[in-house]
Image (cartoon, rainbow, N blue to C red):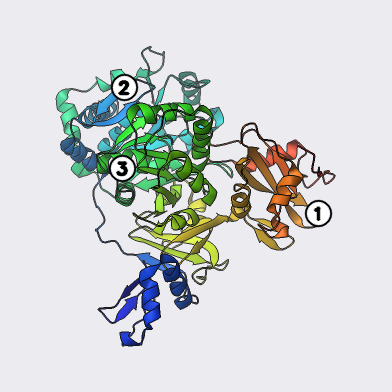
Amino acid sequence: MFRFSITRNSFFFPATSYRVYYKNVANVKHSLLVDLRSSWKLRNMSSQRLFQDKPAHMLQHGSVPLIDEPIGKLIGTAAERWPDRECVVSLHQNIRLTFSDVIRRADRLAAGLMKLGMKRGDRLGLWGPNDVEWLITYMCASRAGFILVAINPNYQMDELTHCIQKVGVKAVISPDNFKTQDYPRMLLQAQQMCPTLEHIIIYSKDHVTGTRRFIDVEELATRIETRWIAAEQDQISCHDGSNIQFTSGTTGRPKATLISHRSVMNNSKQAAVKTELTVDHKVCLNVPFFHVFGIIKGLMCMLHAGITLVLPARSFNPVKSLEAIVREKCNVVYGTPTMWINLLDVQQRLHPPPITLACGVTGGAPASPELFKKIRKCFHFDNMKTIYGLTETTAVIFQTLPNENNELTENTVGHLADHVEAMVVDENGNAVPFGTSGELWIRGYCTMMKYWNDNEATEKTLTKDGWLMTGDQFVLRSDGYGQIVGRLKDMIIRGGENIFPKEVEDVLMTHPLVAEAQVIGAYDKVYGEQVCACVRLQEGASLGREELREYCKGRMAPFKIPRYIEFVMEYSKTASGKIQKYKLKQQMESKGVIPTNSDENITVPLGKNEK
């Protein structure tokens, strides 16, 4: 953080190599000191002037040392601190579990799996939605030293076999079904192609031939064998791999990201502290467990702070979520921007009983300033927070600080996390000045260990001196706050002008009839690319393409105004709520909305009366 230290006759900036000393504080103008004490805006302006030519490179020192313990020890500590407190409420399963319930079942499952031949370091696949069995299995893996492999519950056969083969999964735990998926049938079929897969464990009342029941595995071990799990905690290193998270696959084949116990422990601890979570909080968990958002902010923060997780449904359902908030008196809500947009839609249409929230958190994708304003107005609370991170950084590397100015929350992705080093670089890997956009690089305890069984991808992402190249176009400010400009891969280059979709989306979102907007690039033989906006309107709203273009005039540069506008009912998304822009582009091309390289004869419909 940017600090001024008057008593030490100096001010310092905690980057690795940039420190400026003032020997005579009396020479610092009184007006500057007043500015620094009065307003974060003026403080930022002063810092930007002072550091406008300094490289955007910062190490955020933490006031609390890092934790060097495995996750399993934290699970034991949580059960000792809050044995009879509810840690999870699954409304769709009608199940309530205390901390002592969960550790007892986790240790029984761990002992049962070890009796089947699972050993420390073996990969345990977990394929399913937000059920209590997901949480129990995660804790079981942490306690036994297995590496948990979180598999997207929406994966189809090809994607499932890719995950199992990629990391050599030895056992998979899953429900008997989810949506239209017949999990046992698919897993038995996958087993024929995956020689490492020895055990298929299904949580279901019925037994499926060729599989084992979850409840039966829990009963396999004796009490003595189960007690041995507690003693096993000293044998697990915090530097061991904890879980494998597959990247979201928004740009192609998912990669297997290996994360350590130490990364998970410390990232979640920071997240819990900065969000000010306590035992008084009940969290409506809309995000999926298999995503790092759900693991770090949900499951792990539960262990650090004693919060209660409320699971409204197996996958996100805005109606069920609002019902859960009212019924369980949830005072904290997690969601991606798209989830929050859906919650707003339902709240405004159905007018459920009033709710009182203490805090809301959004992450997983950039949120527009307009969305923050709408959430605060609709749900009548002020403490809305944002987080930013990647699968490869464990999760949270920038987040809202306590008592933060609303304008900061709306226009940044938060402050650099403790014990994390950040640098913004140009295309040659040289640090750009503070306040200048470039690619964000991250270094510290939180970076992934590697991409499993993919040295080439690992070397392209991790430098030899430990920097993780995020692929995000980013602005790092001298006060430690960051602003995401967009994904480098999503950048649109129109006639030599760089356009990031988010800046266009943010303007479109300010239109009162627009519920959601996504911007993609479209091929153009003259300019290289044009801007295409895929817009979802508020329910019952009617808006013309030319009307929307007129609205954009004066609010953005002319070259950024969308050439193509398509009104859509929904977007293709990942299970974690992210828009799949490459699929959206394919859809627009296949519908003839935008041209492909081989088809340039696209007529752009205009006209004020066109709807």
Relative horizontal placement of residue 592, taking residue 358 as reference (left or right): right
Q: Earlier in the sequence, mark 3 or mark 1?
A: 3
Does dot 3 land on a helix, a strand or a loop? helix
Task: Please tell me the numbered disc located at residue 387.
Answer: none
| Residue nearer the viewer, 413 or 218 | 413
Where is mark 2, residue-wise?
95
* Residue type at tag 3: Cys
Relative horizontal placement of residue 22, taking residue 493 as reference (left or right): left
Circle 1/circle 2 CB separation < 8 Å: no
Residue 574 coordinates in the image, percent (x, y)? 54, 37
Q: Earlier in the sequence, mark 1 or mark 2?
A: 2
Which residue is at a point 41% across and 61% down the rendered structure image? 466
Task: Please tell me the numbered disc located at residue 525.
Answer: 1
Could you classify mark 3 by the number of other residues whose Cα lies within 10 Å: few (under 14), some (14-19), or many (20 or more)?
many
* Residue type at tag 2: Ile
Q: Earlier in the sequence, mark 3 or mark 2?
A: 2
Circle 3/circle 2 CB separation < 8 Å: no
Relative horizontal placement of residue 47, taking residue 180 as reference (left or right): left
Q: CA distance from mark 3 to mark 1?
A: 51 Å
| Residue nearer the viewer, 597 or 87 | 87
Where is mark 3, residue-wise?
301
Could you classify mark 2 by the number of other residues whose Cα lies within 10 Å: few (under 14), some (14-19), or many (20 or more)?
few
Q: Is residue 26 above or below residue 284?
A: below
Quadrant of the image containing the N terminus: bottom left
* Callout in the foreground (3, 1): 3
* Callout in the foreground (1, 2): 2
